[in-house]
Image: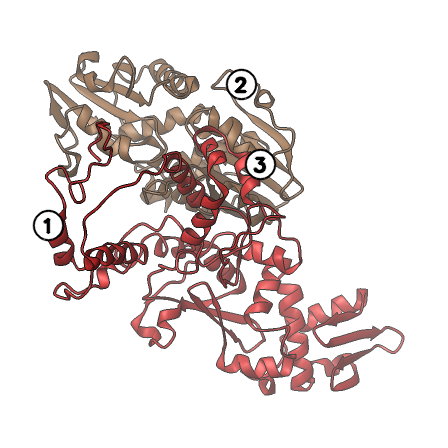
Chain colours: A red, B brown
Amino acid sequence: MSVADATLSETQLAAFRETLTAEPIEYDGLAADYDAAEETYSIATPTQQITVADDELSALAAEQAAYISNWYFYTQQLQRDRKRAFCRWLELADDRPVPARYDDLEAGIDREWGELTIRTTLTADGDRRYEVRHVDDSDADGDALTTHTDPFDARDIGTLDADGRYRPLRTAPSLKPGWIFPELTANGVYEVVEAFYPATIVNWHREQRGELDVDHWRDEQDRQSGIYNLITVLPDEAVEWAASACCDDSQCLKRREWQLSEDEPLAATGGDGVFPCRAPCSTVVAAGREWAKLEREDTQTYSFELTPSEKEQIEAIIDAVADGSVDEIREADLSEGANRYRARYLREKRFDDDGNLSGTPTHPDGHDDSD
Amino acid sequence: MQSLVIVAHGSHLNPDSATPTHTHADTIRATGAFDEVRTGFWKEQPSLREVLRTTHGDDIYVVPLFISEGYFTERVIPRELRLEGWEPELWGSDGISADTATLVASDIDKEVHYCGPVGTHEAMTDVLVRRAESVTDDPNVGDGFGFAVVGHGTERNENSAKAIEYHTERLRETGRFDEVKALFMDEEPEVDDVTEHFDSEDIIVVPLFIADGFHTQEDIPEDMGLTADYRDGYEVPTEVAGHRIWYGGAVGTEELTADVVLERAADAGADIGDAIARVRQRTNPATQVAGE
């Protein structure tokens, strides 16, 4: 539907009349008022101002009808600020006046939220419908995707990745493709996004209003109890490494806004995500606890005998694991340091019977540790 | 507008940990008793810290899907939810009698009804009975059967054993089962020796845990001798030392647990109409067909 087709239902007109008997309307370029003495309605849009009698309301020009159905959708159907703000963001409402937006909505307006592509379209009476699919499926034929109608299905879709592994971090960029929610209402799209990416809309909305409350690392440290008390001893430079390791866009789609403290920014980039990360998550805190344990160890100087290629191979293996690219290395591609045969060969050559690299014990002073 | 928030532990490692929370939320959502049902987790998302801001309601009921009163329900959850002025004394509990405390959550500047955990509500006894019925596929099970309620033990929380003893005693008082005993994973009497603690040939064993995981799916079946390796699975019942062991797994996965969540909210003043009766009917295998 485009602006040229916009018409109003009896329900929409009734709400319009009822609202105007109480107060004037000003919304999104529409200004309307009711003159009780004259029993006329004045309706102004950025390009036109008209005055009509009650019986003329049902025959308004398409442009006025579009402005009124837009007002109806956003103020009468969507009662909650957060949902309204999100739906307006989805259709770029702040960037485009109603007629242009209605024309664009005919083809659909696409926005990305994490790995979701959300397409907004209009129904005949100016209500909105939303289609949600994985960004990787943007060009896929909808019939080739598994159709879902219950928004809470999103929770189950997001539990395991494409390889069947558990996704403890819902905002990790590992959402599996292959599904579609073809026709959601505004409430439905809100719940789908909430299920895929919990609490991201509310935090984004708080940020939009300049009210995002950020809990920085030191706040998090101070709040812990029990086994997580240990993160209080994690050195500051380790927090920097942890943020670089865990909060990069390749690992999490939230945009990290928390720092060491309000006055102590981290050098690591926070990422480019649409929705903010307002506090170290439980994954980072749990990882921080492990690193706090590991960072209590003192460094030690080891001597290893390696060829230059072997040194580089070890670096390549660490890179492959850290980048999650191990599975991409072809079985017979022995030019890759992290190739399985290469790794097995290195182990045969350089590990002794106790698994020590180059026969160098982990604890040369005789400390008994099988590591 | 009335909101229900179910808070649970969740897991970074086990995808099944949150399953009961989601299932019970769905069951309650289907009753329409609340305008919205939200879930929050210690280890998953939304976090306990952020779950209240996902609600829209004016009347918010928070029910912890935890077994016992202690560290999580008395310290971690109130702190993460930012319940201003919370102290465990507000529940006035002896370890198994928590009710409700109404406090302002500073995250949303609204009052929140913070309920005791499902595990110490009396209705949890009914869920244990329901699990006995479902694991034996017999709605009248009781005669000739022993019933072992299994808990973790007191290693980390003395109230943990209190909850086990409480439901064991309530089950005993029903007189439905020949013998009812509390067994533990890390203290005497131990679940490992389950057959030594019962005369009954048939023994129903149900862990008072919220979710299935390492303890209920691996440790307990192996410790009781149901299987040498949990990965090989086991029969229900399995014969061990002349007894038939009917092992039910974590009680919190029983659908009727949704009823206990509702009871907690209703005790705190939530207007839930006939939702409790409907959940009881809907989750009962004997009435399920009629109920639907």
Mark drawn on residue A349: 1
Front one among A75 and B93: B93
Which of the chains bears the disc numbered 1?
A
Give the image location of residue B31, x and y in percent.
47, 45
Chain holding disc 2: B
How far apart are labels 1 and 3 at the CA level?
69 Å
Residue A108 against residue B206 in the figure, above or below: below
User: What crowding class fits label 2: few (fewer than 14 Cα within 10 Å), some (14-19), or many (20 or more)?
Assistant: few
**In front: mark 1 or mark 2?**
1
Report the Cα–Cα distance between label 1 and label 2.
Answer: 64 Å
Q: For residue A204, which quarter of the picture?
A: bottom right
Q: On the image, numbered disc 2 is attached to which residue? A: B93
Q: Secondary structure at mark 1?
A: helix
Labels 1 and 3 touching (C-beta < 8 A): no
Above or below B243: residue B17: below
- Answer few, some or many: residues within 10 Å of disc 1's Cα (few below 14, many 20 plus, some between 14 and 19): few
Residue A79 in sight here: no
Marks 2/3 in contact by CB < 8 Å: the verdict is no
SS at badge 3: loop
**Residues at badges 1 and 2 in contact (C-beta under 8 Å)?**
no
In-front residue for pair A250/A266: A266
Question: With B168 as the anchor, is A275 left or right in this view?
Answer: right
- In the rendered image, the residue lying farthest to the right is A37
Q: Which residue is labeled 3 in the image?
A: B270
